[in-house]
Amino acid sequence: MCAVIDRPARILVIAGSDCSGGAGIQADIKAITCLGGYAMTAVTAITVQNTLGVSAIHPVPVEIVTGQIRACLDDIGADAVKIGMLGSWQIVEAVADALAGVRVPIVLDPVMVAKGGAMLIEAEAAEMMVMRLLPMASVVTPNTPELIELTDTEIEDSADTLLAAQELLNAGPRAVLAKGGHLPGDSVSDWLVTRGLQRSFTSPRIDTRHSHGTGCTLAAALACGLGQGLDLEAAVVRARAFVAQGLATAPGFGAGQGPLGFAPLP
Ligand SMILES: Nc1ncnc2c1ncn2[C@@H]1O[C@H](COP(=O)(O)OP(=O)(O)OP(=O)(O)O)[C@@H](O)[C@H]1O
Ligand SMILES: [Mg+2]
């Protein structure tokens, strides 16, 4: 007799810590857990932050980042990987090396600037990310400022976003999910672009200041969906629904941009 093992998808998150729990690995763990996955983490940096902004960043030594990745992959294994804040080029290089033989979906959130404006990556690290990690990514999820930076183009609307997303696709990722949360308007549109597909996902803009960690949460939810075997479009639809629910149910914590609400989808 053959037993069917129904286990949660194993999702390895490589990202920075947000002590206030709204973004970074804390948000990723909550999102993955709510969506039925099993979250593991390789912490790249410890940030001191809250809803008002980032006040300090303490990078984790490169060998400890690599060690965490190996410890997870060599023992438990992973069904998908999410990469968030990396910080230095040394960490980018180490992560690329550590993931070189990994054959599961990789979601790359090219975190560059925090919502409050703090720089989260060095210039050399951004270059290294383009060279080493973009080609390994199943999907890369830039926000508008990151897409402008990565493609050196002007973006003022959704049409510009599509053009820039197509350009970023030429840098080697298998898909680009270009987020539109930063563009003005009553609705928010994200573009999903692959070599065979251009699809925009549009939903009403939720009017709230509590949007800390939307990008981290979206990328973690996306990685979880891919690890659970959803196809890319279905994983995007569910991840966007999870972020929208989080924005609509934000608990209102903190004096600034507060965290999302985290709960399983109905
Ligand atoms: N006010 C909003 N209402 C509905 N959806 C939103 C809103 N703001 C952002 N989103 C959605 O949240 C997701 C993240 O987009 P956003 O552009 O905010 O990413 P980000 O800037 O990387 O976030 P972060 O600053 O947390 O890193 C996208 O799917 C976007 O459409
Ligand atoms: Mg972001």
Image (spheres, rainbow, N blue to C red):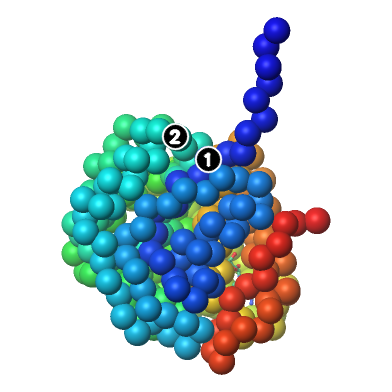
Identity, as a three-letter code, of the amino acid under mark 2: Gly
- Kindly give the residue lying farthest to the bottom in the view shown: 255
Mark with earlier residue (2, 1): 1
Does the residue at mark 2 contact the one at mark 1 (Cβ under 8 Å)?
yes
Point 71% across, 62% down: residue: 263
Residue 45 in view: yes
Q: Nearer the viewer, residue 73 or 227?
A: 73
Taking the spot 57% from the left edge, 87% from the top edge, the residue there is 254
- In the picture shown, does residue 197 fall above or below 179? above
Left or right position of 233 against 13: right
Q: Quadrant of residue 109?
A: bottom left
- Looking at the rendered image, the quarter that the N terminus falls into is top right
Residue 198 x/y as whole percent: 57, 51
User: Residue at position x 67%, y 60% from top?
Assistant: 242
Residue closest to the eye, 84 or 167? 84
Q: Compared to 17, does 63 lie above or below?
A: above
The residue beneath circle 1 is: 10
Extreme top residue here? 1
Q: Is residue 154 above or below residue 53?
A: above
Question: Quarter of the picture for ligand 1?
Answer: bottom right
Q: Where residue 61 sits in the image (x, y, percent)?
A: 21, 59
Please say whether residue 152 is visible from this viewpoint: no
Q: Gap between marks 2 and 1, in whole Å?
A: 7 Å
Asked if 159 appears above or below 131 in the picture, the reply is: below
Q: Would you name the residue on which mark 2 appears?
A: 77
Q: Tell me which corner region of the image, top left, top right, bottom left or bottom right, holds residue 101.
A: top left
Q: Nearer the viewer, residue 133 or 56?
A: 56
Residue at x 80%, y 56% (from the top left corner): 266
Q: Secondary structure at mark 2?
A: loop
